């Protein structure tokens, strides 16, 4: 782990300009994915599944708690089949990002790293937030612990929607840009502890962001228009970052360039593909969600005069 930190520090101090000066990727680069080889080649990738307890146990625990909560809750309080499917899809997204061979590939190719980030910030968190699993997970906990957690709960976004929206928007945007700073991006690839921290922070902040957005959507009010606007601004600033990656004449992450040749990709093409993935598929999630919220606002406002006129008759 120390060697990883020293490598990240050396990259930061050097300005990230000398790819040739980087040592061969150490085993520590892939510790999170339980790698047995310091690199992932196309012929090896389908056997490169990560069964690290650091990842597998939390995912399994959440799934077990959700299943127990379903059994404990009365029939009339259980989530719908759609919500259960959304929760399952969210956990599946996390498994693809962190357990499947994508985890190994994300330490080798910039575009695979970007796919992993998309799943962690715009895929799994959105699906989990749409499933609204809080009540089910709470029901699975021991009574004393559940009561303590419920005592700590507040009205959340419903009490001050605009403040929660703005705070989560700033945190979410800063989080995405922060982890694409070359020194941090490469440091997380060299050091397993920093990599785990990156994944945890990306996921936690993203869950907060989508929870606030969807809570505002579920309870239309003054924050709904702001939620749509902030999603649109999120689409814009992530598109800017994606375009910077795609159009840059220089490789931002020399460490990744050491492995892309095995996949028949030039380092700059690997980076361009990563930028396009951020710009279009990831940006499409924000844009589509903003359109859904705006559509609800428009249809809601058009029905209000009709309801008012019907009430006067």
Image (spheres, rainbow, N blue to C red):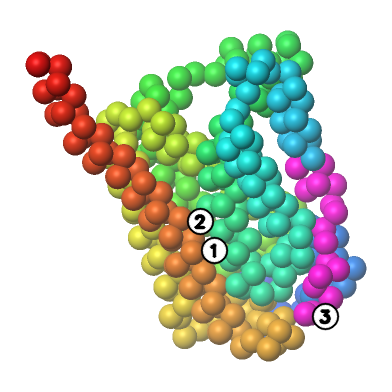
> Is residue 212 in view from this perspective?
yes
Residue at 38% in and 28% down:
219
9 sits to left or right of 47: left
Label 2 crowd bin: few (<14), some (14–19), many (20+), radius 10 Å? some
Query: Spatial distance from mark 1 to mark 2, Cα to Cα?
Result: 7 Å
CA distance for labels 3 and 1: 29 Å
Q: Which residues are magenta?
A: 41-59
Q: Position of residue 129 (x, y in %)?
A: 54, 38
**Horizontal and vertical percent position of residue 309:** 11, 23
| Above or below for 207 versus 180 | above
Q: Which callout, 2 or 3, points at the residue further toward the start of the chain?
A: 3
Question: From what the image shows, is residue 198 above or below residue 271?
Answer: above
The alpha-carbon separation of the residues under discs 2 and 3 comes to 32 Å
Please give the residue where the numbered disc 2 appears in the rendered image.
176
Identify which residue, 215 or 262, lies in the foreground.
Answer: 215
**Contact (Cβ within 8 Å) of mark 1 with mark 2:** yes
Q: Residues within 10 Å of mark 1 (few under 14, many from 20)?
A: some
CB within 8 Å, label 3 to label 1: no
Q: Which residue is located at x 39 percent, y 67 percent?
A: 240
Kindly state the secondary structure of the residue where label 3 is placed: loop
Report which residue position mark 3 lands on.
43
Mark 3 or mark 1, which has the lower sequence index?
Answer: 3
Q: Is 179 placed left or right of 302 in the picture?
A: right
In the depicted structure, whether residue 273 falls above or below residue 130? below
| Residue denoted by label 1 | 180
Q: Residue 142's x, y, as percent?
A: 76, 16
């Amino acid at each position: 782990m120390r060697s990883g930190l020293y490598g990240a520090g050396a990259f930061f101090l050097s300005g990230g300009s000398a790819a040739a000066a980087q040592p061969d990727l150490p085993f520590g680069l892939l510790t999170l994915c339980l790698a047995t080889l310091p690199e992932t080649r196309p012929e090896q990738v389908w056997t490169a599944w990560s069964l690290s307890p650091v990842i597998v146990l939390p995912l399994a625990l959440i799934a077990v708690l959700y299943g127990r909560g379903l059994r404990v809750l009365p029939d009339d309080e259980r989530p719908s089949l759609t919500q259960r499917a959304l929760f399952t899809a969210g956990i599946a997204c996390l498994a693809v990002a962190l357990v499947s061979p994508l985890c190994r590939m994300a330490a080798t190719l910039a575009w695979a790293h970007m796919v992993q980030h998309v799943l962690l910030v715009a895929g799994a968190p959105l699906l989990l937030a749409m499933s609204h699993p809080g009540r089910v997970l709470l029901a699975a906990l021991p009574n004393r612990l559940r009561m303590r957690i419920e005592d700590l709960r507040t009205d959340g976004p419903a009490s001050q929607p605009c403040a929660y929206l703005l705070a989560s928007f700033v945190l979410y945007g800063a989080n995405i840009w922060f982890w694409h700073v070359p020194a941090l991006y490469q440091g997380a690839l060299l050091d397993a502890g920093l990599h785990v921290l990156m994944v945890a922070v990306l996921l936690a902040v993203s869950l907060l962001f989508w929870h606030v957005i969807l809570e505002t959507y579920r309870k239309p009010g003054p924050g709904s228009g702001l939620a749509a606007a902030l999603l649109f601004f999120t689409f814009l600033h992530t598109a800017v970052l994606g375009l910077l990656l795609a159009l840059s004449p220089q490789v931002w992450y020399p460490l990744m360039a050491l492995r892309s040749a095995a996949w028949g990709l030039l380092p700059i093409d690997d980076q361009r593909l990563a930028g396009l993935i951020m710009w279009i598929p990831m940006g499409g999630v924000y844009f589509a969600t903003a359109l859904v919220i705006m559509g609800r606002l428009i249809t809601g406002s058009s029905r209000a005069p009709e309801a008012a006129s019907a009430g006067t008759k």
